[in-house]
Amino acid sequence: MPVLEKRTVSIEELDAMAAVELPDREMLSLVTILITNVLNNLSVTVTVKNVNIAAQVCAVVNVLNQNIGTNLTCTIQQ
């Protein structure tokens, strides 16, 4: 098994590297999706870590409403 050699990094190499800043802690909080069946007042709550996933879930709920006539509502809460 080859041994990795340590070498010094030049200033140019450091400048070429990308640094990514982490988002604020508030942005890392969980997102709650609330899906309610308007006809019988039943609801499902789903907690996810990504607002993009929450938006996709609500988009699917809207497609179901349009295509098969369900009476569901979807809200995203933080």
Image (cartoon, rainbow, N blue to C red):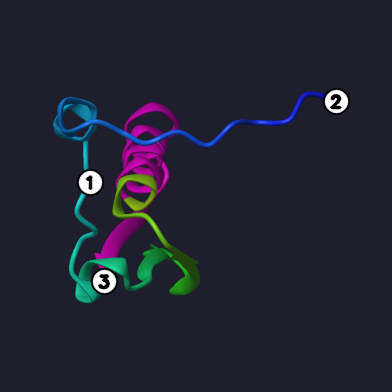
Q: Earlier in the sequence, mark 2 or mark 1?
A: 2
Can you identify the residue that label 2 sits on?
1
Q: Earlier in the sequence, mark 1 or mark 3?
A: 1
Residue drawn at point x = 42 percent, y = 36 percent: 64
Can you identify the residue that label 3 sits on?
77
Which stretch is magenta? 55-78
Residue drawn at point x = 39 percent, y = 47 percent: 53
Residue 24 picture location, percent across and down: 18, 69
Q: Are marks 2 and 1 in contact (CB under 8 Å)?
A: no
Q: Nearer the viewer, residue 55 or 73?
A: 55
As measured in the structure, the alpha-carbon distance from the residue carrying label 1 to the one carrying label 3 is: 27 Å
Can you identify the residue that label 1 sits on?
20
Give yes or no for residue 75 being in the magenta stretch: yes
Question: Which disc is residue 34 wearing?
Answer: none
Q: Quadrant of the C terminus?
A: bottom left
As measured in the structure, the alpha-carbon distance from the residue carrying label 2 to the one carrying label 1 is: 33 Å
Q: Residue flagged by tag 1: what amino acid is it?
A: Val
